[in-house]
Image (cartoon, rainbow, N blue to C red):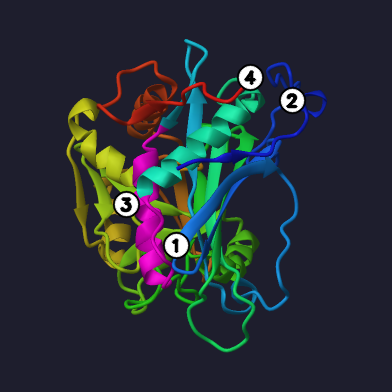
Amino acid sequence: MEITYNLKSASERRTEPFKPDENVGFGNLRTEHMFLMDYRDGEWRDPRIMPYGPFEMAPGAMALHYGQSIFEGAKAFMHEDGEIYTFRINKNAERMNRSADILCIPHLDEQMQIDAINALIDVDRLWFPMQQGACLYIRPFIFATEDRLSIGASKSYTFCVVLSPSGAYYAAGVNKGIRLLISKTFHRAVSGGTGASKAAGNYAASLRAGQAAAEFGASQVLYLDANNQQIEEAGAMNHFHILKDGTVIIPTFTDTILKSITSQSIMELGEQLGCEVRQETIMLDQFIADIESGEIIEAGGFGTAAVVSAVGSYIFEDGRVVTVGNGEVGEHVQRIYKLYTDMQKGYVQAPEGWLQKVERIAS
């Protein structure tokens, strides 16, 4: 793939490493450039990096009317050698194409996705925030651009990558357990729908449930299946719980659950974690009974943004509260979080291929 570089002038670009005085937060900032590529006439074409800025798009663009839009979320980290490394970026590229299948969007070659991301990081590498726990958050996305108001799959699309210098997703990090609302009113997905994709519309549909959770003092919703019997997903994270023998249980992936790359990675790291990690169908009533009996001692969520979030308690819509253990962050969650983030930062050896150095190519 031959990328065209249309960069800001040298006088407009950052010349020194980004050393913010305050926590930059998560997802608030942008770097100076973005990557773009268009799909038309049956092929992806015109890969280019240009200054970050508004799109020119027709008011009738199909993404605006029919929600044909997907995205990914990944992270890159600076290691002690001063170089930037992406983490499992190939898994994001794979998942982008799975989402594309579900929303009738043409595939984008996985290596082309990775090359685009690496090229953009290389151009804006001075924007990596030099502070504890920081990363470059990577947001690739595809949206339909055909100017047509009749329903159907678009014939044209834009692929874009933007970068966000970011800190922790939750200000308290993994040091404080969150509360989840167990809702029988709101449902994230049903079988045969788009639940297994990172479709933009899935997240728009979750906002109302998120507002309801906030009214109960909860951070997110723990979604159940359409019959309100099985645990599925926790807002923007895969749910998990830990038994008193240390076993980590993640709900079995279905077409209503997004396959978290973090969850998949934790399953592959069971031996290093010193515990069994497995997937099961989780029935709500048994889950609550096991918390109350002490069989379940910790719980939480796995996701790219927060990595690992501990759940201290659950609240039902009738106000009933169920506390996990003593409500604090447990030793197992802390151990998982530390191993995983130490791998991302290069402090601990990661499995082969998980970390990929972003080569220095751009001038």
Q: Which residue is mark 2?
A: 22
Question: Which residue in the protein does label 3 denote?
Answer: 291
Dominant secondary structure (helix, strand or loop) of the stretch shown in magenta? helix
Which comes sooner in the sequence, label 2 or label 4? 2
Numbered mark located on residue 43 in the image: 1
For the residue marked with disc 3, what is the amino acid?
Ile
Q: Position of residue 333 (x, y in %)?
A: 37, 34
Left or right of 286 in this view: 322? right
For mark 3, give the secondary structure. helix
Residue 183: x, y in percent?
A: 47, 69
Labels 3 and 4 touching (C-beta < 8 A) = no
Amino acid beneath label 2: Glu
Q: Spatial distance from mark 2 to mark 4, Cα to Cα?
A: 11 Å
Looking at the rendered structure, the kind of residue marked 1 is Glu
Marks 3 and 1, the one that precedes in the sequence: 1
> What residue is shown at x 53% (from left), y 34% (from top)?
119
Q: Is residue 88 magenta?
A: yes
Could you tell me if the residues under marks 3 and 1 are in contact, i.e. CB atoms within 8 Å? no
Label 2: few (<14), some (14–19) or many (≥20) C-alpha neighbours in 10 Å: few
**Label 1 neighbourhood size at 10 Å, few (<14), some (14-19), many (20+)?**
few
Q: Residue at x 49, y 69 (%)?
A: 41
Residue 253, image x and y in percent?
A: 27, 60
**Looking at the rendered structure, which numbered label has been put on residue 333?**
none
In this rendering, the label closer to the viewer, 3 or 2: 2
Type of amino acid at the residue the image marks with label 4: Met
| Mark 1 or 2, nearer chain start | 2
Circle 4 sits on which residue?
130
| Residues in magenta, as a range | 87-109
The answer to whether marks 2 and 4 mark residues whose Cβ atoms lie closer than 8 Å is no
